[in-house]
Amino acid sequence: MSNSSKMPPASSAPTQDSATAEPHFLGTRIRGLRKRRGMTLAELAQKSELTAGYISQLERNLAYPSIPALFNIARSLGVTIQWFFASEGNTAPEDNGVVVRKNTRMSVHYEDGIVDQLLTPQPNRQLEMLHSRFPPGTYSQQSYSHEGEEAGYLLSGSFELWVGERYFQLSEGDSFSFSSQEPHRYGNPGEVDAVVIWVITPPSF
């Protein structure tokens, strides 16, 4: 991560309608992995450059994290964000390892209603593909970086992208690609949801 400052207070977990409702897997998975690693809240907070209070809120399912915050937590626990994806759906045996059905996609929810859905089956291979939805006015506020390369296609809406010192405005149908080692951030300046299909290789996000 290129940003070393403490994260702002976590956003309250939003109320969701029945079509998008999801159980609070994330906090349980963070807490469970932290305990398996033998780390205290204070130790994880120091390693991830967050606060113990912030992480406690996440673990108790009182809030959703920002994208950079969850990236920091994952890195500090020795995994990628993909480890925290979860789903209520069950994959059919004949689909296992090859096909991901729409109703069995694994997902992770961030603050402000941003949602990533994993489009590639687990265990991952040399790439991962994500379906990302950004409500109007939502951003990954802090830049971050990681190993690999990534590309994206803006399926709908409008999108802003910062890569290093460069800034880009994207419209529906535009695509992009860059080295993930460059600090990057992004967001939706528009009045409707922005939907982006991301491909990352290797799966280091």
Image: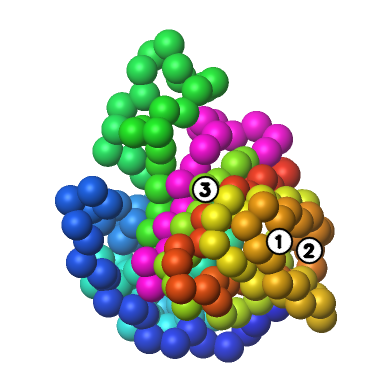
Q: Residue furthest left?
A: 18
Closer mark to the observer between disc 1 and disc 3? 3
Question: What's the magenta region?
Answer: 112-127
Residue designated by label 1? 146
Which residue is depicted at the point 39% across and 14% down? Answer: 93
Q: Position of residue 152 (x, y in %)?
A: 68, 52
Determine the image quadrant of residue 52: bottom left
Tags 1 and 2 touching, CB below 8 Å? yes
Query: Which secondary structure, mark 3?
Result: strand
Q: Earlier in the sequence, mark 1 or mark 2?
A: 1
Figure check: 112 above or below 195? below
Q: Position of residue 162 (x, y in %)?
A: 72, 74
Give the number of the disc on residue 181: 2
Residue type, numbered disc 3: His
Label 3 Cα crowd, 10 Å radius (few <14 / some 14-19 / many 20+):
some
Q: Main secondary structure of the magenta part?
A: loop
Residue designated by label 3? 131
Viewer-nearest residue: 163 or 168: 168
